[in-house]
Amino acid sequence: MNITLSQINPTVGDISNNLLKIEKAISEAPTSTDLLIFSELALTGYPPRDLLKHPSFINSIVTAQKELEKISTKFPETGILIGTPTPTLKGNGLYNSARLFFKGKCIFEQHKYLIPSYDVFDETRYFNSPDYLHNKPKPLLFKKRCLGITICEDIWCLAPSTTKFLYPFDPVESLVSQGAELIINLSASPFEVNKPTVRYNLGHEYVKKYNIPFILVNQVGANDDLIFDGNSFAMNARGKFLSKLKNFEVDSQTFSLEQKSVISLSQNNSMEDLEKALILGIRDYFEKSKNEKAVLGLSGGLDSAVAAVLACKALGSQNVLGITMPSKYSSEGSAKDSYDLAKNLSLECKTISIENLVDTYSDLFKSSFSTPPAPSVEENIQARIRGNILMAFANQPKTLLITTGNKSEIAMGYCTLYGDMCGALAVISDIFKTTLYDFAKYINQEKDLIPQNILTKPPSAELKPNQKDEDTLPPYPILDAILTAYLIEKKSHKDIELMGFDKDLVFWILQRVDQNEHKRKQMPIGFKVSSCAFGKGRRMPIAMKIER
């Protein structure tokens, strides 16, 4: 059997253009293709979220499926397996389905059994799950092959590298017990660092357990805060790769299940993956929202430098504007570092002093308050004036403001609402500061785009005289270790204390994280690149009290 894997980059909701991409991929596949496989919800793009609540959107899906039937008549030797929502036969419900179109008809459909509701996934809000007790998934006999078709979460019943079952029903086991001799999985599996390797290992586990080939076709591209890396692959029954598609690119490959040749994968580079992911995320966010230009503040610090590099690589330097906004607390070195960075990136850089504006605000508040304003007032004035200036430039046609806060600062609330948190897209909000230093060094491997002084000077917000981040925060290696334990590993105060950290420090950090939830609720969306990012994957109450 000749199989073509096709990972396309759909735009959520854009059914007509997604259908054109699908038809193009079908027409470009070799005529010898027996089965052409697309990803989960390729027709609508993933995740369509509350678009699925609109009847007109569902009608468009049904119309597109009829069009797929017509398209399949043009390729009579090829079965087209594609992910799409399908209405239930009764009521207003939906299934997340895989449908096989062949010779002008939909000859088979398989619904997703395991419906995830954790992290960024909220599929139980939209999709029904078939009753596995009375309606188990059926394998499909197609061109003398018995195919076991699954959809994304259906293969995650068993937690990777463990014996812990996450669901009471295993679709793969059910399909194999009924004679499936090949497992096919249509996925929309979001990127996080090292996730491709986790998927490969999961494939190996199934191959080892059942001694049958395994295929996974994943979505590629970015939709809002989620980035999809592609990395679709096929393994033979010995766990050797028959096919492996590119990462972070639209791609397709054709292979034969009977072929003797196999391929070897190069070792995964997490920093390279992280850079590719964020560049793709920025590019797709701008293109899919019909914007072209980015503006960002350049402080002379690491965060804005990394964000500027990513923006220039994603959009082209000619489409990115950097603005420095010095106050009386800004060092000469920060201005020079910003301009050196701009020169390295061929990036236009403007300087707009905020000193007079800060003085005006300060005088106003001094005369308006009955007592002297808190020290934070003057610090926040500076950030909010800068945010106002940046938003003025972002109001130009087809322009968006990129925010530059890192995960460590955002976790601790070391940022200003309506100031440095202004913007449309938080590009590094899921990267801890210590990781950001390593990432910057990776960026500089071939050429010093980021000036060395930015990498070596102590980080500072420069909102008051001689300010350093460590005046307010613990050293970043300690802070990030505690934040990782709390945010990613979900450890308790006592568990973190047992790791060797000071009890009072741990309590203070966790308290700061919890107290600043209201800020994170108002920040722009940020790309998910870890197993737990702020935003849809971490939904915490604001008015709360946690017993510790």
Image (tube, rainbow, N blue to C red):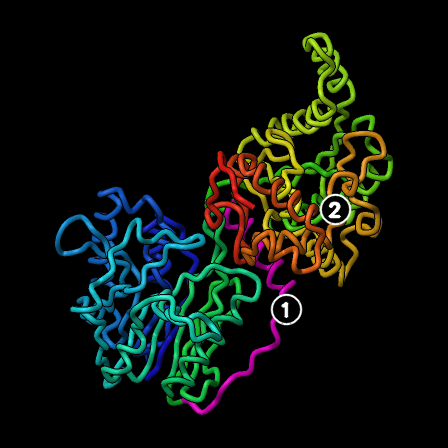
Would you identify the image quadrant in which residue 258 lies?
Answer: bottom left
Q: Separation of disc 2 and disc 1 at Cα? A: 30 Å
Q: What element carries label 2?
A: loop
Residue picked out by circle 2: 474
| Image coords of residue 541 (percent x, y) | 47, 39
Q: Is mark 1 on a helix, strand or loop?
A: loop
- The crowd level at tag 1 (other Cα within 10 Å; few <14, some 14-19, many 20+) is few
Q: Is residue 245 left or right of residue 448?
A: left
Magenta highlight range: 259-285
Q: Is residue 284 left or right of residue 306?
A: left
Q: Are marks 2 and 1 in contact (CB under 8 Å)?
A: no
Q: Residue at x 74, y 46 (%)?
A: 474
Q: Can residue 465 be found in the magenta stretch?
A: no
Instruction: Please name whichever residue, 276 or 87, is drawn nearer the observer in this view of the structure.
Output: 87
| Image coords of residue 363 (percent x, y) | 75, 12
Q: Residue at x 40, y 51 (%)?
A: 11
User: The disc labelled 2 sits on which kind of residue?
Assistant: Pro
Residue picked out by circle 1: 269
Image depth: mark 2 or mark 1 in front: 2
Asked whether residue 311 appears in the rendered view, the answer is no
